[in-house]
Amino acid sequence: MEEGARSCLLLSRSSLEQDIRASYLMDHMISDGVLTGDEEDRIRSKLTRREQATALLELLLRKDNQAYISFYNALVRESYGDLASLLHNSLPLVSPEAEKSFSDGGTRYVQAVLSEGGVPQRPVVFVSRSALVNRVREKLYRLQKEPGWVTVFGMAGSGKSVLAAEAVRDHALITGRCFPGGVHWLSIGQLDRADLLVRIQSLCFRLEQQSQEKDPSSSLHRPPGSLEEAKERLRFLMLRRYPRSLLVLDDIWDSSVLKAFDIQCRVLLTTRDRSLADCVSGSKSEVAVESGLEEDQALEILALYVNGKPQRLPEQARSIVRECKGSPLVVSLIGALLREFPDRWAYYLHTLQQKKFKRIRKSSSYDYDALDQAMAASIQVLSEEHRELYIDLTVLEQDVKVPAKVLSVLWDLELEEVEDVLQDFVNKSLLFRDCHHRPYLYYLHDLQLDFLTEMNRSGLESLHTKVVRQYQQRYSQGPPTSGDEECLYWFRFLTYHMAKANLTQELYSLMFSLDWVRTKAQIMGPAHLINDYVEYGAILDKEFSKLFMVVVCSRNKSSLKSLSRLVVQPHQGSIYSACFSHDGTKIASCGSSKTLRV
Ligand code: ADP
């Protein structure tokens, strides 16, 4: 059901519950085919009129636009005119003409499907690359008959993700015979096996949750414990619960990651590496994304940012586009700056022409110069105070999204103040916001992070130390236990910050504090916990000659198996244990050991 209709139902819920007699309305809804006999029986089994009304509304909220319309018509027919009028303004549009008139190209239905599947919205300033979009759509239509892969490749910042999201924003593709099972978006980026497992876990959770909303008799399973298990779970979900749906894998770097999705489903992937799909089986096709926009389109972006017409832009506009070779990312970064300072055309052109970041040019196969120049210009316009805060973001790991609360700890500022600062960064295209989550999550584009890391190379250790000290100050009484996004961040990344800050003694104490280990195991499961020992074992070994050993026990053998350096063996009946020592083998000669059951 589209957002407006659902919201209206929720707002009118108490009035509806108070008055309606579900048994009168259900007859109409059954004859409209939006309610089944079983569903009616379940509602009728409730004892009181009010309970039946509540159950009907609960069910209705999980249904589609047609159900909303049928319910509205039933209200009218049963003389609940006053209640029907509450729902009238949010009646979904169903006629093809009305649907087509929806302004951004996608119908409300398409928007609802994409939003449910986590597909990002269009950027605020957007130009259509219709030839490219059509090329991707044409490849997607070929997946109608059989599973396969469509690879969208091109350099960083060339607009691959925006293009992929735009290609699926298509009524015919989603409602026709192509992907009636929906579109499910997964942002990947550079990640290790443990992180990949977490991503697939959350995708499985999302799919199971949505499927449970549609069919309450299906159950939610515990998260898969290993990559192999996760792959099988996803295969089952895509085959049985979401047949003929499209999985979009955004920003894939590694073929081993892609193999985890080699489950005979329909996949659209974006990557910089054209050959990535060579490692997977099934039919394949590809679309190349040019690194730059046509001059007209790039000028249109600048014009949209400054609310002007492309023909009226100053002469420097053309030079800026030429200088950055029409890179969509750079043009939008400069555009965002110009929105703040519309008189600075010459200044930004000059800045682009003057800045040189030779190291990145050398170390990369792409020509990132223009981007880095734009980045420097973006940072320069921040106030001194905001610039310092922005530099603190250098410590974020690539592709990690953080809630504002983490930054409120890092910056020691009130949450609202932090949100204001982040809003400023987002407005200036210096930071991205994922609006599909509540609370919002924030992340840097990987090139922005590259740039920050390069700029602050000599200060990295102290920036990470700052994170650790701020955490310690906020959580002096013990680690957070709320299990929310902020808490998860600390459990995932505190060790990472300590390692980067070279705080080995503190890293050692943390990783062998039973309090921390127990809470982390409870909140995140064994795989993440053990991964820390694998990841930082070498650092600890260098510093401490004493051997150590950790034994993690689990009833679920496969959850431990995902970690390559571990020896997993039977341990007390049905419990399995994974032992990790400084070199992964000499477990018998350990000087100390701690055992934890999870
Ligand atoms: P990639 O995935 O290739 O790294 P993105 O798709 O993330 O690149 O695009 C980078 C930035 O470029 C976006 O955040 C947006 O600001 C800008 N951009 C890309 N495509 C368009 C477009 N069609 N219209 C306007 N801006 C765009």
Image: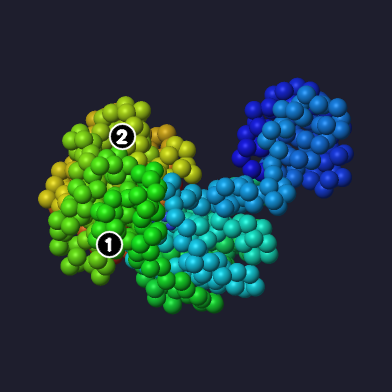
Q: Nearer the viewer, residue 343 or 187?
A: 343
Q: Residue furthest left?
A: 458
Q: In which quadrant of this rendering is ligand 1 seen?
A: bottom left
Q: Residue 190: image x %, image y %?
A: 35, 60
Residue beneath the point at 74% across and 45% down: 66
Residue beneath the point at 42% across and 34% down: 482
Residue 161 sits above or below residue 132 on the image: above
Quadrant hosting residue 143: bottom right
> Could you tell me if residue 381 is visible in this image?
yes
Which residue is denoted by mark 1 in the rendering? 322
Q: Nearer the viewer, residue 219 or 360?
A: 360
**Dots 2, 1 in contact, CB < 8 A:** no
Residue beneath the point at 71% across and 27% down: 86
Type of amino acid under label 1: Arg
Q: Residue 247: image x %, image y %?
A: 54, 61
Q: Residue 363: image x %, image y %?
A: 20, 67
Which residue is denoted by mark 2 in the rendering? 421
Type of amino acid under label 2: Val
Residue 417 sits above or below residue 174 on the image: above
Nearest-to-viewer mark from 2 and 1: 1
SS type, badge 2: helix
Q: Residue furthest front?
A: 312
